[in-house]
Image (cartoon, helix red, strand yellow):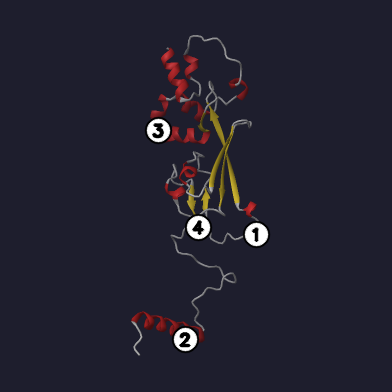
Amino acid sequence: MRLPKPKLRELKEAIIAVSSTLSGRRFTTKFPAKPCRVPENYRGKPEFDLDTCIGCGACVNVCPTEALTQIDDTQAEPPTRKITHRYDTCIFCGNCSENCTTETGIKLSQQWDLAGLDRAAMAETHDFELQKCEKCSAIIGTKKHLVWLYEKLGPLAYTNPSLLIAKSGELQTKPQAIQQQPQPEKAADASDFMRILCPKCKCELNIQL
């Protein structure tokens, strides 16, 4: 009886595997006794580079499994954005790395041995200070994001007082000033422009003038 070609191929592979085992040459690795090398482009655990990550949340928006989550704590002092990565639910798709605003804020590493018994330990959280509008207290973004925009825009950043102030760090968000009682409307002056304002409040200021 003649065997079909697929069966002959499987028989050939079985003979090679048996002969390799008998001769001492194995196809399986010796992990964990010896470290396992992965290919150069292997997609392992995403890792944040806190020197270049600006906390913009772009990676959170494109995560298909919600392994990346974001919480803005506006009641903290100072207001803080918390970005959490749970690598027990991460599928290592690479969306976060491909859509990173700075292109290097989060990258896939070659770390793959992530097994553990405590799921609570399979998470890491990074904090970023938020910048709020000094008039309406709306969240503008993280301070690192504003500074990054300033450096990215170069000379064009001088057209935006909010970016200049964020870069210099001369003014800080003051929740107590933001939550103060409304004051009677007054004519806008030059000092009103040198504040960190959201687009809505900045537009209203320009219309008022």
As helix, strand or loop, the secondary structure at mark 3 comes to helix
Picture disc at residue 117: 1
- What residue does disc 2 label? 19
As helix, strand or loop, the secondary structure at mark 2 comes to helix
Crowd around label 4: few <14 · some 14–19 · many ≥20 (10 Å)? many
Q: Measure the alpha-carbon separation of dots 2 and 1.
A: 38 Å
Whether residue 41 is situated above or below residue 11 in the rendered picture: above
Q: Measure the alpha-carbon separation of dots 4 and 1.
A: 19 Å
Picture disc at residue 108: none
Q: Which of pointers 3 and 4 lies earlier in the amino acid sequence?
A: 4
Q: Which of pointers 4 and 2 lies earlier in the amino acid sequence?
A: 2
- Give x and y (percent) for residue 87: 56, 53
- What residue does disc 4 label? 44
Frontmost of labels 2 and 1 is 1
Q: Which of pointers 3 and 2 lies earlier in the amino acid sequence?
A: 2
Picture disc at residue 153: 3
Tags 4 and 2 touching, CB below 8 Å: no
